[in-house]
Amino acid sequence: MARTGFMAEQRIVALAGGVGGAKLAHGLALARPEAALTVVVNTADDFSLFGLHISPDLDTVMYTLGGIANPQTGWGIAGDTAAALEMIGRYGRETWFWLGDRDLATHILRTERLRAGASLTTVTAELAGALGIRAAILPMCDEPVATIVETPDGDLAFQDYFVRRRQADEVRGVRFEGIEAATIPPGVAAALREAAAVVLCPSNPIVSIGPILAVPGFRDLLRDVSAPVVAVSPIVGGAALKGPADRMLASLGHEVSAAGVAALYRDFLDGIVIDQVDAELAGRIEEMGIAVHVTDTVMRDEAHRRTLADETLSFAARLESRARA
Amino acid sequence: MARTGFMAEQRIVALAGGVGGAKLAHGLALARPEAALTVVVNTADDFSLFGLHISPDLDTVMYTLGGIANPQTGWGIAGDTAAALEMIGRYGRETWFWLGDRDLATHILRTERLRAGASLTTVTAELAGALGIRAAILPMCDEPVATIVETPDGDLAFQDYFVRRRQADEVRGVRFEGIEAATIPPGVAAALREAAAVVLCPSNPIVSIGPILAVPGFRDLLRDVSAPVVAVSPIVGGAALKGPADRMLASLGHEVSAAGVAALYRDFLDGIVIDQVDAELAGRIEEMGIAVHVTDTVMRDEAHRRTLADETLSFAARLESRARA
């Protein structure tokens, strides 16, 4: 019997980076409130600042699912202030990475618990639980991994490239330091195995989804899962909606299009959701053996997050029933 | 030739706890801007909260000398907010210790530097220097010392007694854990040896000045210094102007008066400044071999901090010239 949707207790797994990924993850939670949602989040952007462990993507996903994200930026907490950061500046320290006062609470408590020996998985569950978030937000691994961006000016730590230098450098290569020692957390593997659908959110394929896929064994796991694996393209009309994904794809020799994104995921991807402006790419993507769903993918508001998530899950369900047929 | 005041490059050393001590230390800086001021500060109240190293008395002295202290409370930073603390509460943690957002910058940077191996002396100099403070603010020691308050309900950590339980417990004893391993920082010993005057600020004799005096060798050093050692009584008219010093003196079997304070310091004290309401105590104190100066000791405003400091230093100078005569 063909399935037309997701029932209670079915699990959806989303892979996400920061703002764009968090929005679709939020849409998934809104579209299937009865389902169990697991969001696996990039942690290769994590870094230490003033002795605090900062996990930008985990925070963005957590604040977004918790309904407290800053709607203007997509990251940080709505209405947050920066008195502490101003004082840090008064102490003569650099303040190019914005730290909100409420946001600092997250960094402080995370750092405290990590220093006490708790894993990032445990700490994230504690923080998200305290904010009343039902979804499981899981780091891609508990080991430290650091994205290094290779530029004509030399290697840059990710936040140096991304925030301080405002993504102005040409990216000649990207590597994930520590990735060879990273292991898939048991909760991530279990969620993928029991998933009814796996969704790659419209996050940067190189530096957001890329590190998750680079955790040893992760791509194999995605090839092996019984659920359909679908992506939502972060490239629309040849450009990234946010961030440097387009320039990064180009300088690394990839096609800057939804087809280029599909090619990066082709070894495990069953389907991709692309924007209507890219409809003409459908044929080329289908030739890779990847199904295509065309719709409006730009999430302008909360209602649209939900609509896009709903369409993405329905598309995945159709792929599953087709595979079973 | 009798000396009538302090010349440039002369050093004044003040021993201080929190609010009352910081006020007189500030007065000393205002009264003798041309002198070198060293403030030796109690650190036995220091504790760890959310993984941050908090030094309440160092902060109070630093903010007061830096001109940014909250004038209403005497501690914390003027105009500070508590957004981070509110968020910490939202994460389900206890928030009985007030942490301002600007204040957090201090705790965060101090903790970062201590974890990197810097001494508390070094970190305090860095922070105070960044705030443009000319005076040397020195912790009483670089080793961790913790005041434990013994009560009918058992042992209490100092901030538990002082902040959380609002000093409501009867104090049956006080001990300073770790004090036997504490050492006088070289800068403190050097400042005391070269001092033209040593001033014990009107801080709690048991839990503010007490720990400083308990650092091994400290009382001996005070007995040996060539400079006059004078105190300003924190007990006025049989009561503490702030905090539990009066009840603490009583429950520990000391006289609750300026004479009781003088008795606690009699092995090294040359003179004490007492309030005019306590003028009748002068005779008894002088019988201990301690000179007395009577004046208005309640520092109601900044002008009065300066006046009291000026009178205290002039008193010390008279003691010195008398000793030399």
Image (cartoon, coloured by chain):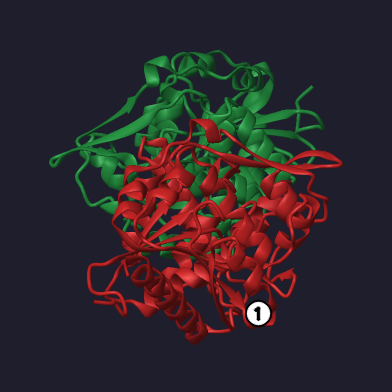
Chain colours: A green, B red
Q: Quadrant of the N terminus of chain A?
A: top right
Residue B81 image offset from top left, x and y in percent:
59, 68
Circle 1 crowding by C-alpha within 10 Å: few under 14, some 14–19, many from 20: some
Residue B200 image offset from top left, x and y in percent:
50, 62
Residue marked by disc 1? B279
Q: Which one is nearer the viewer's eye here, B190 or B91?
A: B190
Q: Look at label 1 and name its amino acid.
A: Ala
As drawn, is B262 to the left or to the right of A183?
A: right
Mark 1 element type:
helix
Q: Which one is nearer the viewer's eye here, B161 or A255?
A: B161
Q: Quadrant of the C terminus of chain A?
A: top right
* Residue placed furthest toward the bottom: B303
Residue B222 image offset from top left, x and y in percent:
43, 51
* Residue placed furthest toward the left: A152
Residue B16 image offset from top left, x and y in percent:
51, 60
Q: Does the image show residue A73?
A: no
Q: Which one is nearer the viewer's eye here, B245 or B58?
A: B245
As drawn, is A287 to the left or to the right of A308?
A: left
Residue drawn at point x = 52 percent, y = 47 percent = B213
